[in-house]
Amino acid sequence: MGKIYCYTCKLFGGAGPFANSGFCDWKHANRAIDLHERSNEHCTNTIRLSERMCVTGRVDKELVKQASDMANYWKEVPRRCVSVISFLAERGLPFRGSDETAGSVHNGNYLGMLELLAQYDPFLAEHLQRHSNECRSHTNYLSSTICEELVTRLGKQVEDSTIDRVKKSNYYSISVDSTPDISHVDQLTVIFRYMEGDSPVERYMTFLPNAGHICQEQADGQSAVHSSRSAAAFFDLVEQIYNFFTASTSRFTKLSAVLKRLIMSVV
């Protein structure tokens, strides 16, 4: 009770407590475990276990191979789906059609692109043949639900990457502007402008229908700014600090004095 063992050393034998009676000296646990994992005995046993696991003819060889093949299969399917989503998003093309039926001419660009790629990709062709038009209880990565989830995750990754670049830049700005799109709907967007090396960069973070152009209506559209949670928190902090110290001359004077003392102490 209350003891721990080393699996590999217990299996192949060893001289220390991790392989025999068990380790329970919790006061020195961190150091003892670290020393054991670095010991020649533990490293040798770990290599022996790895070699045994790779030997052909083991009892669960076929089960391990089946699990590995299944894991690789479900890695390859979303990889192709992500490629199609990236292609459509880069060109601003719609994803969904009027139905989600494989083989239909109205199933949208997402399924249509997957069907086109399947003509030259035997793996994807087999997947579509086996799993298309199944009920939603079956995993197939072809439904609109999974497509929307992948779009959301990719968008979050792009957003995080942009925020990291903005924070690393010495010069940046954030602005909210609107312009009509191709369907004449006035779209409100959050724009980040920053420097990467010697080149200016402009990134549009989100789009939503604009409520109007007067102050109150623009204020109602402030959710556009907060659609980027990380960016909003970062720039809100900068804005709050600036507003606090510029609202009062005495505050700014005190801040200048503190900064001067800090600079002098560093120098």
Image: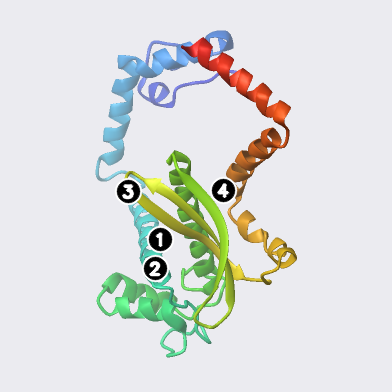
Q: Mark 1 to mark 3: distance in Å?
A: 20 Å
Regarding mark 3 in the picture, which secondary structure is present there? helix
- On the image, the x and y values in percent for residue 256 come to 61, 23
> Do the numbered discs 2 and 4 sit on residues whose CB atoms are within 8 Å?
no
Q: What residue is disc 3 on?
A: 61
Front position in the image: 53 or 242: 242
> Counting other residues with Cα less than 10 Å from the Cα at mark 2, is it few (<14), some (14-19), or many (20 or more)?
few
* Residue at 72% across, 37% down: 247
Tell me the mark number nearer the camera, choosing from 2 and 4: 4
The amino acid sitting under disc 3 is: Lys
Tell me the mark number nearer the camera, choosing from 1 and 2: 2
Q: Residue 74 — which label? A: 1
Q: Is residue 177 left or right of residue 60?
A: right
Front position in the image: 39 or 65: 39
> Counting other residues with Cα less than 10 Å from the Cα at mark 4, is it few (<14), some (14-19), or many (20 or more)?
many
Q: Mark 1 to mark 4: distance in Å?
A: 34 Å
Q: What residue is disc 2 on?
A: 90
